[in-house]
Image (cartoon, grey):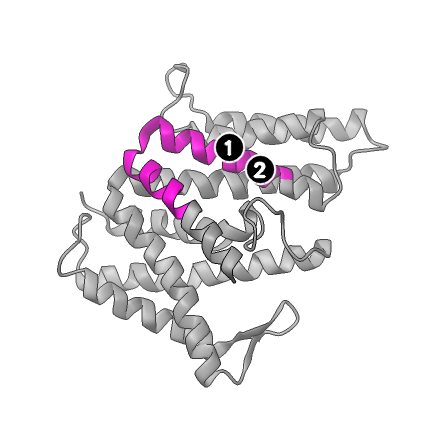
Amino acid sequence: MKQRVITALIAVGIFLPILYVGDIWLRTLLALLAIVGIYEFFQMKKMNIFSLEGSLTLFATLSFLFSQKPLVALPRGIDYFFFYFLVVMLLMTLTVYKSDRFSFEDAAFCSLISLYVGGGFSGILFVRSISFGMAIFVFLVIWGTDSFAYLAGRKFGKHKLAPDISPNKTIEGSIGGVIGSVLLGLLVVPFYNPVKFSVFEFVLLVVCLSIFGQLGDLVESAYKRQFNVKDSGNLFPGHGGVLDRFDSTFFAMLMFQIVFKFFGDI
């Protein structure tokens, strides 16, 4: 427990100032975390990241992080997202020339994890582009959901949510996480609402963030069980790897963008 607390304090102490500054500092940090995340996936699947397919996967992942503000100007009508589709085609082509070592399943794996990790971290950039306060609020909802779900599960938990994947999680705990996050959101919205959501829209946002954050956590538990590992890595002592720390964030950030596209008005 002591190690977990120390690691958390150090991580927050580094992450929050960079999140506040934003711009290239945040983009660089997230790019480094994304590289580590892809490395963790390759390690779990026992694939060599120092290979052509590893390089292509990293390239596809980083293309998401630099799609909004490209480092190099691209022709009109072309953005870095096109590079993702190019990489997918190249990965599929590798199954022709490396058929004995690289299968369609491997190509699908590389394509999916680059979308998952790159898209997830680019979501953080999107939320930060609105404001530092909004980014903090989204993280509070994600972390608050975990805390409220844990407390509600311990007090009222009886029915298993996903017994084959995460036997300690309960339906009551999950509902408690959502309710607790909504109450947190209702406390915040009178004082801070940069996207001009109505109360209904703000509650909808919080519910979606809470639900999809929990789904992200379950998905990570599922693929760790698939690969038969306890943690995705050991970058954060006592907490695991990058994927362990950002599992809920990836799903929640995607849902934030969807809700924002429908209701956001800056």
Q: Is residue 192 above or below residue 162?
A: above
Q: Residue at x 54, y 83 (%)?
A: 159
Q: Nearer the viewer, residue 169 or 201?
A: 169
Taking the spot 38% from the left edge, 33% from the top edge, the residue there is 26
In magenta stretch: residue 64:
no
Q: Residue furthest front?
A: 2
Badge 1 local density, few (<14 within 10 Å), some, or many (20+)?
few
Q: Secondary structure at mark 1?
A: helix
Numbered label tally: 2
Magenta span main SS? helix
Q: Are marks 1 and 2 in contact (CB under 8 Å)?
A: yes
| Image side of residue 154 versus residue 47, left or right | left
Q: Is residue 193 above or below residue 120?
A: below
Q: Which residues are magenta?
A: 11-39
Task: Give the camera-side residue of 221 and 233.
Answer: 233
Above/below status of 236 relative to 73: below
Query: Is disc 2 placed on a helix, strand or loop?
Result: helix
As drawn, the label of residue 32 is: 1
Q: Amino acid at mark 1?
A: Leu
- In this rendering, is residue 16 above or below 176? above
Task: Give percent across and percent down for residue 101.
Answer: 82, 33
The residue nearer to you, when weighing 119 against 78, is 119
Q: Position of residue 33 (x, y in %)?
A: 51, 37
Q: Is residue 13 magenta?
A: yes
- What residue is shown with label 2? 36
| Residue 237, visible in the rendered structure | yes
Of the residues shown, which amino acid type is indicated by label 2?
Val
